[in-house]
Amino acid sequence: MSSENIVLNEIDFELDFLSNDAPTAENRAKAGSGVYRVLISDDDEAVHQITKMLLKEFNFEGRRLEFISAYSGQETKKILANNSSIAVLLQDVVMEEEDAGLLVVDYLRNTLENKITRVILRTGQPGKAPEDQIIANYDINDYKSKTELTVQKLYTSMYSCLRSYRDLVTIQRSKKGLERIIRASSTIFKTCSFNEFLTGILQQLATFYDEESEGLYFKCNNKRQPDGFVAKDDTQCYTILAGTGKYEKYIGSNISQIEELNHFENILCELKNGSEMYVRHVQDKGYIAYHKGLSGSGNYIFMEGSKDDIEVELVKVFLSNFSMAIDNFQLHKEMIATQTEIIFTLGELIEKRSSDTANHVRRISEICYIIASAAGFTEDKCEEIRIASTMHDIGKIAIPDHILKKAGKLTDEEFAIMKSHSEHGYNILNHSNIGVLKTAAVIAKYHHEKYDGTGYPEGIRKDQIPDIAKITAIADVFDALTHKRCYKDAWSIDKALSLLKENSGKHFDPRYINIFFDNFKSIEKVITTLA
């Protein structure tokens, strides 16, 4: 459709009333080459040319405008769907259809759920789109007749929309930042080693980078990793415990012995002598956070980078809590280690009572871990199986010595009593609410079941048998065969392996038998190490 000409008046070029938002040299340097994207949607080429000409020199807070053109409602929808960073949409109402522009607004707000992009609706036929109805029914930010859209009013609308867009983007990014902090809190605690945990803290900070923004919280290298380190002090020195990017090579080193980091020692000393928690910006370097740990020693984290004040507050929320997370992580791991050692010790006591050889339960646990890991279980589950499998024969505590330690063959009555140890083990462990003990209860009960259904205590078969019990059965039988017992001599490894192969699909699940043989080199190392 043809549009009315945009009126140009000399006075329209006098914009002193907007001078408060005029970009200073400082703002220009800060913004760099950033742009605000403006989508012009109109079926009249003249409107595109005039709009671009009038706004050619326009900038907001040091950022210029980048124009994108669309000549139909359908084309506009495609552009909006593929570009979420459009700041302002200058939308004509009547294009290929009388309500094409209104359908674009509806698509933007309701289908794309984009509430950020600012919309200035323009029309050359206001009678077909009454302002009071449009404002009430459509989520737009400004409504202008093309005959009234002078340069001054165009500038005023752009300033108003870009201020609003800037503030909404800031809120959105702050929201995303807080969401990242929450996600990071749950993610970093899933790691197993202390170094992985510390490195995880640094790597989570890399997620504060926003690809759609000209700014970033922290500098990232080409591998999208931040450059930073975590350090801890003791009475003698500051030691780097974890590092990413260019600091990774310094892990385990004393900061005072690293020439590149000599200037940090004085900074860390100042932080140590200050408050118990502090986040400090190091000019042209980055941020250092300090917190006095529960043990009295200081925890430090440094990240290269800089950012606007509002966004730095999000980083401070993350950094000011990292040290408490380190303390909690260490306490948690110490508690888990203590529980694990108690479980292993209890398992070994049971095995010693039945005159089994030393390290039987430790070999079982490591073999189970290898099989479970190769089978694709998660790291957490593999570790749980490793610990829980040590309790597979805990039910033997209820078996009388004259049966448990009998050197000869058991009678049918004695064997029936011996088999009851699986049920006893389950009953002992299943009352616990601790996950690893629940897993141990399942292993204790079902690790004597056989793939063909001839095992005990329930005679279940194939997929009825829990996978963790199938894995433990292979490890238990193999280790029992290859070590001396009160009722038999040790078999050779080759003979034991032959029996496992022969019983694939009978006693053992073929899938886990194949995994056992595929990973036997690793299993051999366990046998040698824990002989």
Image: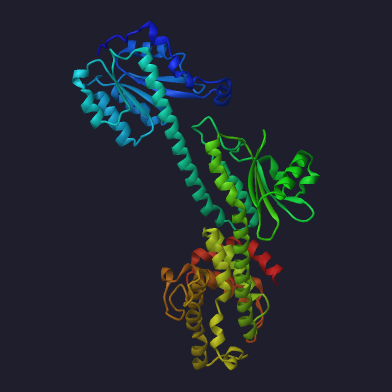
Percent of width and height locating residue 32? 56, 24
Looking at the rendering, which quadrant does residue 370 occupy?
A: bottom right
Horizontal relation, residue 262 to residue 396: left or right: right
User: Outermost residue, left direction?
Assistant: 127
Horizontal relation, residue 14 to residue 265: left or right: left
177 or 414, which lies in front?
177
Percent of width and height locating residue 420? 49, 86
Q: How is the image coloured?
A: rainbow
Using the rendered image of the protein, determine whether residue 341 is visible from the camera's viewpoint: yes
Placement of 20 over or under 427, stated as above or below: above
Q: Residue at x 50, y 63 (%)?
A: 511
Using the rendered image of the protein, determine whether residue 85 is visible from the camera's viewpoint: no
Placement of 232 over or under 78, stated as above or below: below
User: Outermost residue, top direction?
Assistant: 10
Numbered circles on residues, count: 0
57 or 511, which lies in front?
57
Rendered-image quadrant of the N terminus: top left
86 or 389, which lies in front?
86
Placement of 327 over or under 178, stated as above or below: below
Percent of width and height locating residue 247? 70, 42
296 or 490, which lies in front?
296
Looking at the rendering, which quadrant does residue 368 occupy?
A: bottom right
Placement of 68 over or under 513, stated as above or below: above
Percent of width and height locating residue 521? 65, 62
Rendered-image quadrant of the C terminus: bottom right
